[in-house]
Image (cartoon, helix red, strand yellow):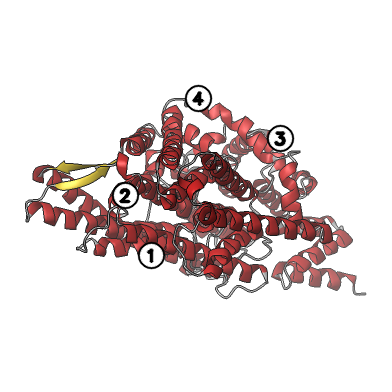
Amino acid sequence: MDTRTNNLTYIPFYFFVLLIISVPFAITMYFENPVDLVKMSAFIITGSFFVMFSLAIAAEDNLIKGNSLSFSINKSLDIPVFIFILAAVLSTIFSLNPKVSVFGQYQRQIGLITFIYLAVIYFLSSGMLQDKKRFTLLFSLAEITAVAVSLYSFIQISGNDPFGIQQPGVDRPSSTFGNAVFFGGFLALMFPFSALNISSKNNKIFKVLFPVIILGGIIVSGTRSAYIAVAAEIAVILVIYFLVNRNKKGIAEHPQNTGKYIKNILFTTGGVLLILILYMLIFPESFLSGRILSIFSSSNNPRLVLWQDSFGLFLKYPLTGTGIAMFSSAFEEFYSNRLRFLERSGYFDHPHNNYLYMLYSMGIIGLLAYMGILVQAARRSLINIFKREDLQEKIVFMSFAAFIAGYCVYGLTNFDDISILLYFFVFLAALKAADAEKTKEVFISRKITAIIVVPLILVCSFNIYSSINDMKADRFFKLGNNLIKQGKFAEAVYNMNTAIALNDYYTDYKYALANTVYRQVFSSETMPKETKMNLLNQSARQVEGLKNSHYFINESNALLSLIYYEMDREQEAKMLEGEVLKKDSVNITYRINLARYYIKKGDLRKADELMNVVLELRPKSLDAYLTAAYLNFKQGNIEAAKNYCEQILIAEPGNQFAVKLLNEINALKKP
């Protein structure tokens, strides 16, 4: 890699640095979606500025100075990336819902726009990272970021969380990722680069301390796939070291230098394993011990059933898939009762396997392109390890080989958030930059430059505006939800409608508003009937409009049936009820809501039938206990009602409904 002279490229590089740092750290409880939306906004905004300044400076050099616009090309890596983006575009064109596939779901946020940005960032940053200082700085910043989020997870697991990010009752720390799986997966990507000191740390203590901290973060995350990924990375490093050491060149000529890295890895890993073994012997019943031991148990694993059930998606959509972000909608057709009983309180919006997700969402073309990227990255890493004479270059490519191995293993049982995807494509760009012998420069004329640069800058400008608008909308949505809890119905509806006006492609907002209106009408005893019917009609039209756009069709039908029941449209409601329960015979939330409707109507027998099914499933749901308490009170089972109220107050001290019902029960007992 050649060090380039200083020029205006430092401006886009600053935005590149900001992109690398901001996305993993981006999280705030100021919004209703505090993780995915915030991270995606940070990604789009900083990524857009990086792209715009990169293109603007290149265009200025091209148009004013007369120099040709140049791009670095590495066919081995670039062609699979290009085919992958082509597969993403095709899958979106033929998607079950192209709009959702373009922008992504509200919860995950990953859509076609995300993959296009990742590809553009990959192509632009690969040329920039040919500068040795920038290459080293990238890994220094990435390593410091990994250490920082690991340290924050240690604070969380100690019971302190200064920023209030950790969800109550969650045992596994998620740091700034909102999910322990993504946290562990992110650190697993960084471990080989830290262990092999690609950031060129000079301090001997930091050389050992940083990888130890990162490994500690992986362990406390409780992410089993990350454990196995790190084991795979260490195995790859050791195998490559011993294979290369058999030769008389490269590493063998510097055994004392390379041996230090290998010894550090072995001693660190051995020390951590010893501590873990002692911990499991002393605390065999702890959560962490259970997570580690569960690696060796496959009984009643929902993911195995999920993979079996979901294969029907490939058979139905083999070529271009269902479309990005459409797994949850398409999977409703193949969801088995066995899986629903294993995973009673949740839902699957992903097959928890990167390879299956690519197959299902982008079809066989997408999967082959995705695997092509991984295979070619591993191939170029191995070729350079055995071809290069320089020791440091061999170590750099050894870290890339380990990184690819770890990422491949992690993807077998889990999937990527935007932080993992960003770092994957950036490290892929770094691999391309390091693979200088295979990389060539391609020059583009002035006319083509203008055709490429101007539209991209305009699109990036619009996306910055759109991301800011999305955050504004989500803030209004959060305010609306908070106002509902305060009993300020009119103000809540106003804020939710404002969120929809600012951003009408997130169907979650429309669904939440309709659900809010329904619950208010259902629970109100003083609202005039005419007002109730007007509100219910508006909600019904809202949900009817969602039936073909919301990614959970059954969820929309369930809410619509409840609204119809409240409107006395019983025949339509019963038809939808049958469809909903046929598709999902478990559906705890829907059964609870139906039971409440029948309690209100006075049909305690029907309500009892529904709640018996719910309680047999033993859900960890306060709503289930609240409904059971009220039903038993209505049936005259006072002791059972009191018992449910006490269980509710243990889980949520001060729960107003439980306190009120207990007061009524105690009043009945007084002579």
**Pointer 2: residues within 10 angstroms few (<14), some, or many (20+)?**
many
Mark 3 = which residue? 338
Total marks placed: 4
- Mark 1 or 2, nearer chain start: 2
**Pointer 3: residues within 10 angstroms few (<14), some, or many (20+)?**
some
Q: Secondary structure at mark 4?
A: helix
Residue 245 x %, y %: 53, 43
The amino acid type, in three-letter code, at marker 2 is: Ser
Indicate which disc residue 126 carries: 2
Visible in this render: residue 465?
A: no
The amino acid type, in three-letter code, at marker 4 is: Lys
* Left-right relation of 273 to 459: right
The amino acid type, in three-letter code, at marker 1 is: Lys
Mark 4 = which residue? 316
**Pointer 1: residues within 10 angstroms few (<14), some, or many (20+)?**
some
Q: Secondary structure at mark 1?
A: helix
Residue 476 x %, y %: 43, 66
State the residue in front, 450 or 323.
Answer: 450
